[in-house]
Image: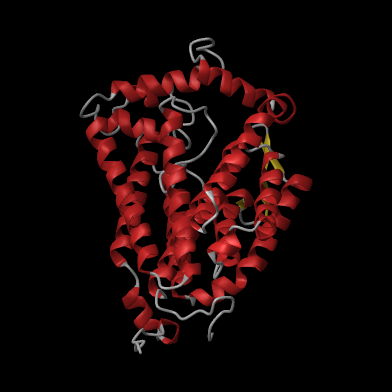
Amino acid sequence: MSLDLSIDRGAMTIGEKLGQISWSLVFLITLVASIGFAMLYSAANGHFDPWASRQMLRFGVGLVVMLLIALIDIRLWMKLAYPLYGIVMVLLIGVDLFGNVGKGAQRWIDLGIIQLQPSEIMKVTLVMVLARYFHGATLEDSGRIPFLIPPLLLVGAPVALVLAQPNLGTSLMLIMAAGALFFLSGVRLWKFGVLIAAVIIAVPLTWQFVLHDYQRDRVETFLDPDSDPLGTGYHITQSKIAFGSGGLMGKGFLQGTQSHLNFLPEKQTDFIFTMLAEEFGLVGSLFFLFLYGLMLLYGFIIAGRCRHQFGKLLALGVTVNLFLYLFINVAMIMGLIPVVGVPLPLISYGGTATLGVMIGFGLLLSVHVHRDVRMSRRGMGDL
């Protein structure tokens, strides 16, 4: 007979929960965000306006939101997973019906105080709802096709709406994050093989009827970036020049020529890592990636220490999302994959993207604080 000595962390006071928060992770998040403020200051040629000051304000609000989320019982987040998913789905539908158009895409909805991009929030909400669905699922459950139909629909609906905006990068992130959770939940590899084969078969139809002209141009530019260096290949060509010109130690803070002479496009958003590489070189870039690696390590450790499946899957999903942000953005600016417009979290300028990332970190911290909460196989436990 074994004796359960675990602590029900759901019954802790606010002070006790604050003591359980991983403040070293909070410090690491703040450190990375501070590097982002410095790069946005540099992007504006040594001015806090228009980007750095606003990003600092957004991060401050996001930090408060993150800590509030961390203190809320993880069982409540489990209970709210489906309602929150439904709300974000309504917002996505609202974007397609009457959203604001910017840079050729309809991705934002005006809420008065903020221009909200629901697809960024869906990245976190989809992880939550899949973690809720697979909580308590056995390997036998994950092996049955009927059991997998509902989560496939939960993934397919937002992906279809995001593709219609159009937003290929976010659609791919939703699919890959969902695929990771399916795998972590015990879905057999042969099912992924069947799905990949179906995708390969559908590539010609997707190319002809789904992708927009600019998306096809990006793929063709990726395959032959020198075919139109002053047109569709301009972004990636300038990015490679700036990336390589930084050398080992970089040109110094505020001294990047490609960015400050305005050769580098979108230097405050998608290509901000290129500017960092030009100013701080290979050494600075590797140090920055090391900090991101530490955040990913924190995510995996928190997932490993959690005693309930919902928390494990939620922490792993948030961590996979962070990795996808990083990998896609860095690979994109280096010309390893086509340009798909994925920001670098905590660094790129953006309101909803920053909020979405901070919500994800809040859920990760909540998993850590409530790692020993007792949950039944299907139920919520005592809330």
What residue appears at the point 48 percent right and 62 percent down from the top-left corner?
313
Quarter of the figure with residue 336? top left
284 left or right of 310 in image = left
Q: Position of residue 77 (x, y in %)?
A: 55, 71
Residue 130 seen in this snapshot: yes
374 relative to 179, above or below:
below
Total numbered labels:
0
What residue appears at the point 42 percent right and 32 percent down from the top-left corner?
331
227 left or right of 260 in image = right
Rendered image coloring scheme: secondary structure
Q: Position of residue 253 (x, y in %)?
A: 27, 34
Figure quadrant of the C terminus: bottom right
311 relative to 227, above or below:
below
Figure quadrant of the N terminus: bottom left
The foreground one among 201 and 87 is: 201
The foreground one among 72 and 152 is: 152
The foreground one among 328 and 43 is: 328
Q: Position of residue 227 (x, y in %)?
A: 53, 9
Q: Position of residue 190 (x, y in %)?
A: 56, 45
